[in-house]
């Protein structure tokens, strides 16, 4: 895969993405490892769009797609790389919600040697990998970019597509509460509601319902709540023991980072999740004064100014010390 050094004007990107899709067939559609709401919704939205225009495609991700998104069209067709892999190798790939090629994970093993990639994303840290790029850094979610692409392709806002787009907006804006909730986002949301989306039901399903395992792991990790730098930085940790004792899955741990971030006076909240004895996944949330995307990028990760993440090799206490020191320097 090649990488473009310069972004083309957005209307040109839309036209190029449409041309890529219309000229080719037999697509592999993939989002980032361990897909969240925007990644899952974007994958299924692209699948629906390809189905609508009569294209062949396979949708696959590495890591489990949360069951709470099971109401989305095509959810039962979305393959999990660890469980089932197509035998063919794909020449045409549509990547959604991946800031760099590494975020695709092991699914890249399914790419043909002469692969051509359409990179659709909204992350400011996107490195413009692939052969065709459709990237809007000021979009609230990748589904917002797909809304524009659906318009470019003159596709109708059928309820299946509208529900996927609304779900991605709902999750990546925190229920239309985060600073990325722009007038355009609200305009799109209104159009999706007018198309028949049951917004209140989706909000209850996606944002409000919690599992017993979530409560169990929450009780465990709140005992690790810590502060530094005059309580401007706060964090919690999830160890392998916590996961084993509570039986919590990645889905159960969604939202844990809001507890340190939402404390009055905290400027940066963090969640350290031990994925194995020598690897820690770090999630960053900023209340606006600190660019956590820059911090995550220094550790090989990326994301947005207010929300980002990375994975660091090392033991949990050492990673915590290293990252908190870096965050503290960003406050100066």
Image (cartoon, rainbow, N blue to C red):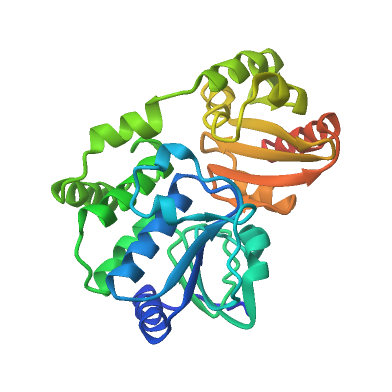
Q: Where is residue 228, by image quadrant?
A: top right
Residue 153 as seen in the image, left or right of residue 111: left
Q: Would residue 141 be seen by someone viewing this image from the given angle?
A: no
Residue sitting at x 61%, y 71%: 87
Q: Position of residue 247 (x, y in %)?
A: 64, 24
Residue sitting at x 44%, y 45%: 37
Q: Where is residue 148, by image quadrant?
A: bottom left
Residue 244 as seen in the image, left or right of residue 101: right
Q: Position of residue 216 (x, y in %)?
A: 59, 16
Residue 298 as seen in the image, left or right of residue 214: right
Residue in front for this viewpoint, 169 or 60: 60
Query: Which residue is at the far left?
Result: 194
Residue in front for this viewpoint, 265 or 114: 114
Q: Quadrant of the N terminus?
A: bottom right
Q: Would residue 99 be seen by someone viewing this image from the given angle?
A: yes
Q: Position of residue 67 (x, y in %)?
A: 46, 38
Residue sitting at x 51%, y 23%: 262
Residue sitting at x 40%, y 57%: 44
């Amino acid at each position: 895969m090649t990488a473009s050094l310069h972004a083309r004007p957005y209307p040109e990107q839309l036209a190029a993405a449409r041309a890529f899709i219309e000229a080719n067939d037999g697509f592999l559609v993939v989002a980032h490892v361990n897909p969240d709401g925007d990644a899952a919704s974007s994958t299924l939205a692209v699948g629906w769009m390809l189905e609508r225009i009569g294209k062949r495609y396979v949708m696959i991700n590495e890591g489990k797609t949360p069951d709470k998104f099971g109401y989305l069209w095509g959810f039962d067709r979305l393959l999990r790389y660890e469980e089932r892999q197509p035998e063919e190798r794909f020449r045409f790939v549509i990547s959604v919600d991946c800031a760099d090629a590494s975020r695709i994970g092991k699914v890249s093993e399914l790419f043909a040697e002469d692969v051509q990639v359409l990179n659709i994303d909204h992350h400011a840290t996107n490195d413009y990998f692939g052969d065709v790029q459709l990237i809007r850094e000021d979009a609230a979610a990748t589904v917002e970019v797909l809304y524009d692409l659906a318009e470019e392709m003159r596709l109708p806002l059928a309820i299946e597509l509208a529900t996927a787009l609304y779900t991605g907006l709902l999750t990546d804006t925190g229920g239309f509460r985060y600073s990325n909730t722009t007038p355009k986002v609200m305009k799109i949301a209104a159009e999706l509601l007018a198309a028949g989306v049951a917004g209140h039901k989706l909000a209850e399903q996606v944002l409000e319902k919690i599992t017993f395992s979530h409560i169990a792991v929450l009780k465990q990790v709140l005992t690790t709540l810590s502060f530094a730098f005059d309580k401007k930085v706060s964090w919690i940790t999830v160890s392998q023991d916590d996961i084993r004792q509570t039986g919590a899955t990645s889905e159960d741990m969604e939202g844990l980072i809001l507890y340190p971030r939402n404390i009055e006076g905290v400027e940066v909240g963090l969640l350290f999740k031990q994925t194995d004895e020598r690897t820690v996944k770090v999630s960053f949330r900023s209340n606006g004064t600190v660019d956590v995307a820059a911090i995550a990028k220094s550790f090989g990760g990326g994301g947005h100014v207010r929300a980002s993440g990375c994975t660091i090799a090392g033991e949990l206490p050492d990673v915590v010390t290293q990252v908190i020191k870096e965050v503290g320097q960003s406050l100066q």
